[in-house]
Amino acid sequence: MKNYKTTGVCSRQIDFKVEEGIVKNVKFHGGCEGNLQGVSQLVEGLSVNQVISKLDGITCGYKTTSCPDQLAKALKEYI
């Protein structure tokens, strides 16, 4: 299990696994629980590159990042 400390968002940390290039077991700590559970379910089973391409650059309100964008950053750091 990998852990990524988020910055600039409500969630504090993202835990995830990557097996053979596939994203699994994404868990956000903090943030908008329902929305982030949805994001976690939607990316389950996708390739790392698919998740990055879908989530990279998403912003939240006035912020320059978002929880989904932070997941993309975590996966970029992973690869």
Image (tube, helix red, strand yellow):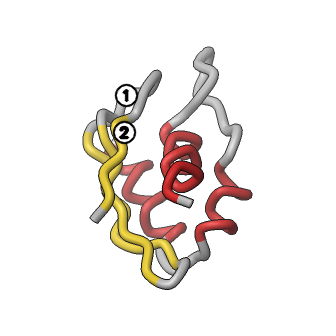
In the rendered view, does 44 fall on the left or right side of 51?
Answer: left
Q: Earlier in the sequence, mark 1 or mark 2?
A: 1
Instruction: Measuring from the top left, give residue 70's x and y in whole percent.
Output: 51, 40
Proximity of marks 1 and 2: CB atoms separated by less than 8 Å = yes
Which residue type carries mark 2? Cys
User: Toward which corner of the image does residue 10 lie, by quadrant?
Assistant: top left
Residue bearing the label numbered 2: 32
Considering depth in this image, is 56 or 38 the residue closer to the camera? 56
Residue at point 40%, 74% (across, down): 24
Mark 1 secondary-structure assignment: loop
Instruction: Measuring from the top left, give residue 54's x and y in whole percent.
Output: 70, 57
Q: Is residue 21 above or below residue 68?
A: below
Considering depth in this image, is 35 or 16 the residue closer to the camera? 16
Which residue type carries mark 1? Cys
Residue at point 37%, 57% (across, down): 37
Residue at point 32%, 59% (across, down): 2
Instruction: Measuring from the top left, give residue 31's x and y in whole percent.
Output: 34, 36
Residue at point 59%, 29% (across, down): 65
Q: Is residue 63 above or below residue 65?
A: above
Instruction: Measuring from the top left, give residue 67's x and y in whole percent.
Output: 48, 39
* Foreground disc of the pair 1, 2: 1
Q: How many marks?
A: 2
Residue bearing the label numbered 1: 10
| Label 1, residues with CA under 10 Å away: few <14, some 14-19, many ≥20 | some
